[in-house]
Amino acid sequence: MGKAKPASHTAAELAKKAKDATVNRGGGNKGIEDRKGGVAGHAKFQCPSCGQAVPDMKTGQAHWESKHSKQPFVPEDWKDKHAEVGGVTTQGTFVVGSKKVKHK
């Protein structure tokens, strides 16, 4: 390695690569649909009382105790939005860092 080339990557460069690999952006209309999670959305469950979307039942229980504490918590009443649309979301379709890049 010569003097003009740095021996390692900078912290800013590594942070940008990590962000690009995990953040959805771009893609036009398909990108918008992806960021919304398709028909079901990325959150799996929906509160039967107020319609709030939550990712898992533990978060749902915390939501229930915070917002609807006067009523009993019944997990069976919660809608599984992913099961209603076939169990599929669009998560990760348009992540910039997932594209294969050929180095020349």
Image (cartoon, rainbow, N blue to C red):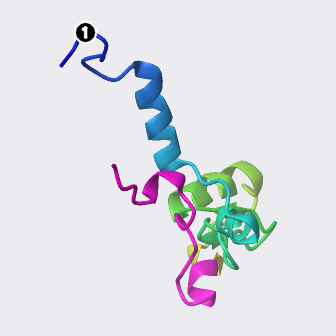
Q: Could you classify mark 1 by the number of other residues whose Cα lies within 10 Å: few (under 14), some (14-19), or many (20 or more)?
A: few
Residue 48 vs residue 21: left or right?
right
Amino acid type, callout 1: Lys
For the point 76% across and 58% down, the residue is: 68
Image height check: is 103 above or below 99? Answer: above
Q: Is residue 61 above or below residue 3?
A: below
Residue pictured at 56% horizontal, 86% vertical: 83
Query: Measured from the top left, where is residue 46 in percent x and y?
Result: 69, 71
Q: Quadrant of residue 52?
A: bottom right
- Location of residue 64 (image quadrant): bottom right
**Where's the N terminus, which quadrant?**
top left
The span picked out in magenta is 81-104
Report the residue at 57% width, 75% height from top. 89
Q: Quadrant of residue 7?
A: top left
Q: Is residue 73 left or right of residue 102?
A: right
Q: Does the magenta run of residues contain 95?
A: yes
Camera-nearest residue between 6 and 89: 6
Q: In the image shown, does 43 or 74 lie closer to the viewer?
A: 43
Q: Which residue is mark 1?
A: 3
- Secondary element type, mark 1: loop
The residue lying at 63 percent from left, 66 percent from top is 73
